[in-house]
Image (spheres, grey):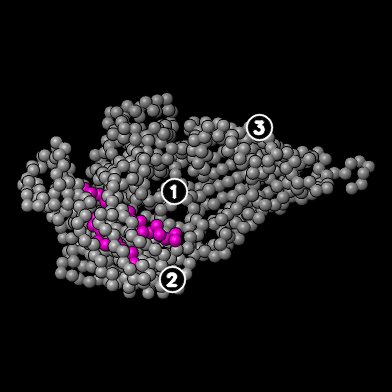
Amino acid sequence: MNKHTGSALLCILTLLIVTLNGNAAIITTTDDTNISAEQIEYADNTLSITTGSETTRIERSRIKNISFTAQKRANDEFATDSADLAEILPKALEMLAKYPDAQSILVTEEGNYQQRKDGTNLSRYRCVTYLVQDESLWEAQISLSFDPNRETIRIMHARSYSPDGTVHTLSPDQIKVSKGTSGSVYFDQYQDISFTIPEAEVGGLIDYCYEVEEFNPFDRNLFQGRFYFQGSQPVGESVLRVSVPRDKTLHYIASNIASGSYEPEKAEAVDSIIYTWKFYDLPPIISEPYMPSYRDIVPAVYYSLHKDFTYVHEKLRPMFEKRFQLTEPVKQKVDELIEGANTVHEKIARLYQFCQKEIRYISIKGNLASNQVGHPAEDTLKNRYGDCTDKGMLLATMLKHIGVEAYPVGVRTNDNGRSVREIAIFDDNHCITEVHLDGRIFYLDSTATDYRYPYFRSDDHDVVADNTMLGTLKQVPLPPPEDNAVHITRKIGLAADGTTRIDFESTQNGSSEASFRSSARNLKAEEYEKQIRSQVSALTADYVLELATHTDPLDFNIQFKARSVYTLNRFATKSGRYMIFAIPFFEMSFPEVSLEKRRYNIEYNTSRLRTDQVEIKIPANFGVKYLPPALRIQSPYVEFEVIYDQQGDNINIKRKLAFPRRIVPVADYQTYKQDLEKIAHASKQKIFLEEKASEGVKP
């Protein structure tokens, strides 16, 4: 199941070493000596390290690092009782009869998340999956991430259950622990624990359970998480249990529940309250083109100890202020960049371009400060690298020097589902810059590298921005279609034998322009020409390419423009006295309306606009026999117009297609589908020309 589980416990970094019993650890001293410990205790600025019967004491000043790891478990025995698996298999077969096309079936899963009285956290997750097809065998390969400086992870059991009742149990020495690999530009302290459940086979079960103890939370007053109950495979039973001390209140929201609100079962233990949510017999999610993120359509529970963001903002704000310092090196760089600029917008554009192009994207994460706040602006400027939080902080700080109020703000990009703002959880995956100027608020994103001011990434549009420094939540507006436009002109000359010469030119802005810039920037001139040739040759192999060029993608002072000129020999079809002509690359298709019915909304990243202007010069000895009719469509979700006009030997065509909204609800799908199908049909219409009769010759 495509599931993200566990608590996102990103909290304030505590520098205090606390009492930790029963956790294997590696202590590194200031002279780089490593000491293995079975148990450690801290008191009076001294760490007591116990291994076997020996205890060593080290002063805190000599401790460089403490690393907790799950590697010290080679001699442990896993649980081998499999009686429950014999009972689970018949349930799996019942579900298979109901969902015979399933690749695999999640028969049962349970997530338990607990905050203890001392503010540490313990979670346990178990799932049992029935493997139906060969493609599901990969699910026996398990990989889990953990921070060894804050967490221990324990595999409780991992086993397979064959159709004949044989149980194959994972041996502890088959578990591997390695440094996590997140990519060449992303670095953190996480490690990966991985294993393959032995002897997994189609028709059998795989069952694993693991426990994570967060012994060193960043902040013991924060406890938060999320759990999703459905995915791409059928689910028999899915259970979430969240436990908090009796003196604390758990705030939660349940989304995408068919009955509206969904209240959990509550049970009072000796010193805690347990909240339980249960779901049964959930069908698989069937993917649809342009559907919302899974988290926006599956049943989900989000929980936190804090009803609003007051506590989180108060904790993070001093960190922001510490890093949001306009130091002399930053001032000097700003002065250098804006020299000669005449207006405030020209100055902003230069700073924006610098942060996009000159600050490489490299993410280094180690604690809450770097995760949620980033590094100081001066450090990012000096290093010439940083992630979205670092770049957002640097741009906001630079703007401060030219008298422009700006802040780094957290967002959840719209391709990853709506952000949760009803309760306080860390739910952002990106950082952009909020600019306050001349009584209005707008946004810039310096993480991307190809956006010309004032445009910014389309996945930032129509999201909620969390401004920690001001303590506000604001909606990032959806820009008008004109801010994400492609304008195309074609001048076409037709010869009597059907040969077609096309002079093509396009200009763009917004995300469309950034995409074209990025593509052009990464291609050499000969590679770009090869790309154009590939496109033209799809029309006919008999062509001549005269020109394939574009403006400098690194020149952000001008709008990006591309131009190509090519001839298609005998391209237009001739039949007797008639010539049938289809405008190259004029046809449109819309895969989002390919289904007869939809279960889910259509969601785009942003609004958009495309305009086409076509001028066709017809041969002197031909007249127009048929021009397609005009078509106009006006709805809340699509605006379209195409007009064909003949003036002498010229045919002029104007076409405009705009999508002013990002989301099309299911309730309006049929009307929207009909509109787009009309547009697609109109784009396939052909022009018919008729050869004129010569003087004295009757047609």
- Look at mark 1 in the image and give the residue it sits on: 459
The residue indicated by pointer 2 is 96
Q: CA distance from mark 1 to mark 3?
A: 37 Å
Q: Which residue corresponds to the image point at 56% horizontal and 62% vertical from the top-left? A: 595
Residue 229 seen in the figure: no
At which x and y percent is residue 370? 27, 43
- What is the chief secondary structure element of the magenta stretch? strand
Task: Identify the amino acid type marked 1.
Answer: Asp
Q: Report the residue marked by disc 3.
A: 546
220 part of magenta stretch: no
Label whose residue precedes the other's in the sequence (2 or 1) = 2
Q: How many marks?
A: 3
Residue 267, relative to residue 544: is it above or below?
A: below
Segment tinted magenta in the rendering: 134-161
**Left or right for 535, reference 206:** right
| Residue 358 x %, y % | 39, 32
User: Residue 389 occupies which quadrant of the picture?
Assistant: top left
Task: State how far apart marks 2 and 1 are (Cα).
Answer: 38 Å
Pick the residue in front: 439 or 186: 186
Q: Residues within 10 Å of mark 2 (few under 14, many from 20)?
A: some
Marks 2 and 3 close (CB-CB < 8 Å): no
Sequence-first tag of 1 and 3:
1
On the question of residue 155 being in view, the answer is yes
Circles 2, 1 touching at the beta carbon (< 8 Å): no
